[in-house]
Each structure stands twice: as structure tokens, then as C-alpha cells.
Image: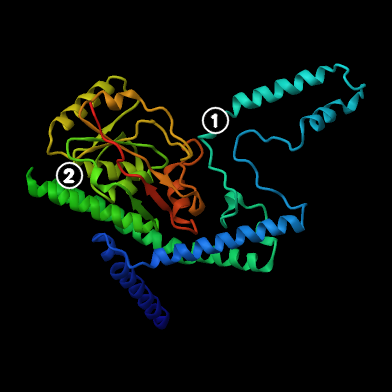
Amino acid sequence: MEDLYSVALAVFQLWMVMVLFFIMLPAMFGLSLGVTGVYIQILVRILEWATIRIQRGRQERPSLAVPLPTGIIERAGGSMEEEMGHLRRSQPLAEGEFCLSDAMYFCKKGLESIVDDEVTQCFSSEELASWNLLTRTNQNFRYISLRLTIIWGLGVFVRYCILFPLRITLAIIGLSWLVIGTTLVGLLPESSAKNWLSELVHLTCYRICARGLSATIHYHNRENRPQKGGICVANHTTPIDVVILANDGCYAMVGQIHGGLLGVIQRSMVKSCPHVWFERSEMKDRHAVTSRLRAHVAAKTKLPILIFPEGTCINNTSVMMFKKGSFEIGGTIYPVAIKYDPRFGDAFWNSSKYNMVNLNLKSLCLLQPHQEKHPSHRNRLDE
């Protein structure tokens, strides 16, 4: 029993040394050892090979199921003539003769177009053209060949036995550090040193959390990044957007008050940085929030405000109309576009289907790292 305890202790020590010195320390200084980049290149080649093998397998086995559509309407295959003939089979009619089922067919197609329109499709996971080793586009493709089966099995092993424990460790360290660090900094009196320490704690913790997601982030047009006293507006796909953007600089967040673990994080963060949290259920709170935001922008020494004007999460295929309230505050507006590579995972948060815990677990269990690109601050608008 003692030998088993010694082995477990040695494995834990080795694990923590690897996490601290090879992942956390480079992340804190914004450095990378290049391991994730090599991993992505290998992964891209595997996915390309798997796509070609699946396409060839479809030709060899036409009966193989195709990926299901991601829309809310399940449409049957076939031409219009075939579908109308299927409806008429109960009472065969001569060609050109009217049948009431014809009108019902067109009513059905019209209702499908209304229900599953372009706006509705923005609230479902983006459909992929090929299999990315995940269940979102998996229709038993792993059984096409032995090599695909082996790769799929290795993917399951890497996902749950290597990446998941590593990401859980980094997430726990990053969030714990964020709560403890911001709480301690909040005890200090207001000064420039407190602001500097607050930015350092936020930036360090966000970088650790980004490594916990195996995120590879590409920033463009860094010279136009948001400045203090300004407002950063961006499209919204997932709560992870905050982690991605804050790796390049600190922001004052604006968002709804939550309970549970997220509520604990919000209450600790606001102690060291003037984040703006509000209750959507209180109508009067909207005017109070607007006043606080205007006062924040007026103070040119405070961090830029980060706002998601869409008001909800979209699946990253398009952008919904922005709400005008974000642009009535005044100040300089810095627009940001965030784009996730769908091959490496589904970043979209469907809040009606998954809660925050399920979203985080799904992100931590992905085989692939997120490869996020955000054409950063391409335009600058002055109001």
C-alpha cells in the first residue's frame, strides 16, 4: 500500500512540475513552446486524410448514412416530383389532374422555410462538410476502415486520458488564482499600483485558462486595439470569447449577474476592477447601467469596456443586428470580429440546451484545440 502511495505521489509531482514549468510559466509571460502548433499541424493532416477516406468510403458503400442537417427541420431527400408522388400514392391520378395533397405539400414547404429561416439557423451548431472525429458529424464514419477506427480510438484516449485531466488542472488553477488574486488586490487602497496589479492578475489568469482550452489565438491589426476610456464591441459565440479577447489586453466586463461558481468569480473580479454587472429582470437597472457606463468612459484612465451588442450567442456563421444601446454611451468605439475554426470544435453556446457547467465540460473534453482568429479592431469609429 505504501509503494502504491509513493508511486501515486511521484506521478502527481511529475504532473504538477510539467503543468507549472512547461505550460503555466510560458503562458503567464505570453510565450509558447510550439507544442500546440505542431499538434495542430498533425491534426489538420489527420482530418484531411480522414475526409478523403470517408469520401472514398461513401463511393464504395452508397448505403452509408450521410451527416444529419443541423437545422430544426428534418427534410426528406428526393425531388419535388418524387415527394408529391409519394403523397399521391393512395389515390393515383392522371398526369396534370389536381389533387388536394399538392396544395398541402406546398404549404408544408412554405412553413418549413418560415420556421427554419436564416435567423433560426444562427442558433444551431454550424454544419461541417467533413468528419472531425467528434460526434457532431459522426454517422458511423469510424467503421469505414480499420485505420479510421484506430484513429478514432486514439482520439478518445487522448481526449479523456490526456487532454481532459490537463485542462481540468489548468482550469482549476486559473480560476482559483483569479478569485484569490482579485480578492487580495481588492483589499488594497485605490492607486495606480492597485490598477497595475489588477491588470496583471486578470491577464495572467486569462492566459492560463486559454492554455486550459488549448487555444491558439491569432490577432490581427494589433495597432488598433482598444484604448482606455473606449468601448470594444464584438460578436458573441460563447462565454469563452472573454478569455480569448482578454489574452491581448484587459477589459472591464459588462454582463448579467449569475449565481453559483460564475457568481463567485464575478463578485471577486469586481473588487479589483470596475466591472459592470446588472440584473436583466429589473427594468430600472438599465438606466443605472447606462449611467455607470458613461461615467466609466468619461474616466480616460479606466480599462476599455467590452460589450457584446448582439445580446445573445450566435453560432459564428453570421452576425445579428447590434442593439443600439451600446452606441449611445459615447466615446470611441473599437469593433472586433471573432472567428472560430469549426474544424477544431463547436464553440457555440446554446444556452437553451446547455448550462454553463455543461458548456465548460464540453470544451474541456474536445479532442482538438480551438484555433481562434479575430481580425482585431479593423476599424475605429468615433461618435
Local crowd at mark 2 within 10 Å, few (<14), some, or many (≥20)? many
Quickly name the residue at label 1. Answer: 118
Q: Say whether disc 2 or disc 1 marks the residue closer to the N-terminus.
A: 1
Picture residue at 72% right of the left edge, 55% below the top: 58
* Residue 140 location (% of width, % of height): 67, 55
Picture residue at 40% right of the left edge, 60% below the top: 167
Quickly name the residue at label 2. Answer: 272
State the quadrant of the N terminus: bottom left
Question: The residue tagged with tag 2: helix, strand or loop?
Answer: helix
Picture residue at 37% right of the left edge, 80% below the top: 6
Q: Is residue 230 left or right of residue 24?
A: left
Image vertical order of residue 280 relative to residue 369, above or below: above
What amino acid does circle 2 point to?
Ser
Question: The residue tagged with tag 1: helix, strand or loop?
Answer: helix
Image vertical order of residue 298 relative to residue 248, above or below: above
Depth check: give the residue in front, 48 or 170.
48
* Residue 56 location (% of width, % of height): 70, 59
Picture residue at 30% right of the left edge, 57% below the top: 208
Depth check: give the residue in front, 309 or 354.
309
- Indicate the quadrant where residue 251 lies: top left
State the quadrant of the C terminus: top left
- Indicate the quadrant where residue 18 lies: bottom left
